[in-house]
Image (spheres, rainbow, N blue to C red):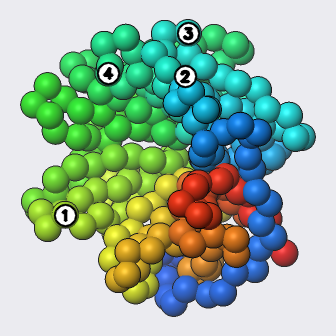
Amino acid sequence: MNFCRRCFYLLLLLMLANLAMASAVRKPLYKFTTIDITGSQRLDAFSINDLGVVVGTYLDQDGIRHGYKLFNGKFDIIDDPNASGWTVCIGINQLGTIVGWYINADGTGQAFVYQNGKFTDIAPEGATFSMATGINDWGRIVGTYYDSAGLQHGFLFDGNHYTTLDVDQAGATYTAAWGINDWGLITVQWGDPDGYDHSSLFDGKKYTEFHVPNSIYTDAAAINNWGEVIFTWYDADGYAHAALLSGGKYTTLDDPDGTDTLGYGVNDLGTAAGAYYKNDRPYGFSAVPK
């Protein structure tokens, strides 16, 4: 076994140990910054790369949903030309390639890749609805789609081939892939027959479930190259919280200005992105470790 391969397996084992040692949720140690566009009804920040570029979506006063990119305080609107009033940017890699989805003229959700100013549709064959949610620096993309029978699956696209991702849990009602890092580790969300959401990590061979302590629902989102995973989880009273799994510990990421917080993105510097609710209105946020 050569040195590079040894390094790969060592880091992979450390990432899996990160999950195995997970314990109670710790208090926040982050500085939060609100992200918003003047005139929007709501805004979500879904992803942030190491350069600090944020992508997401917002709803304007006319009820049109737009995708956006934010860098150094400047917003660029990113709307698929085939969209019928609905574009959502969800993932961005270090090269600036963006993935997401839009609603077409038929009212169907369609996954896309946006690179060098060009939109490209992607979806597994036979998909009736698709969303692209994560992309790594190798250009591998994950997302979710519905088949002709109305069943929801996750997918992995390597640029040439699609692989369907379904958790190996008896009775699972759906699978949705969300994040992928450069090591190929994929976060997935899935549902059980009782209607509860769960999350697992897929390493290419097996699914390992993880669960935020004291949560009723656990929805994993992005995973960075250190194996840190950001979540949205719900407590027994129905309130949403964000948490980051790092070094075997869960750290809460609840925005101090909000009543509910949703965790979506985390980069390799540990900076998180998401949304919080204030007076029933969602605002985006970034959270930098102190």
The alpha-carbon separation of the residues under discs 1 and 2 comes to 31 Å
The alpha-carbon separation of the residues under discs 3 and 1 comes to 36 Å
Q: Label 2 is placed on what type of residue?
A: Val
Q: Reading the chain from its start, which is encountered first: label 3 or label 4?
A: 3
Within-10-Å neighbours for mark 2: few <14, some 14–19, many 20+? many
Q: Reading the chain from its start, which is encountered first: label 3 or label 1?
A: 3
The alpha-carbon separation of the residues under discs 2 and 3 comes to 13 Å
Q: In the visual, does 252 lie left or right of 271?
A: left
Q: Which residue is mark 1?
A: 195
- Image location (x, y in percent) of residue 271: 74, 60
What residue is at 86 percent from the left and 34 percent from the top? 74
Q: Which mark is residue 108?
A: 4
- Image location (x, y in percent) of residue 163: 32, 33
What residue is at 71 percent from the left and 15 percent from the top? 116
Q: Label 1 is placed on what type of residue?
A: Gly
Q: Which mark is residue 113?
A: 2
- Image location (x, y in percent) of residue 232: 48, 65
Within-10-Å neighbours for mark 4: few <14, some 14–19, many 20+? some
Q: Label 4 is placed on what type of residue?
A: Thr
Q: Secondary structure at mark 3?
A: loop
Q: Which mark is residue 81?
A: 3
Q: Nearer the viewer, mark 2 or mark 4?
A: 4
**Quadrant of res 72:** top right
The alpha-carbon separation of the residues under discs 3 and 4 comes to 15 Å
What residue is at 31 percent from the left and 13 percent from the top? 106
Q: Secondary structure at mark 1?
A: loop
Furthest-right residue in view? 72
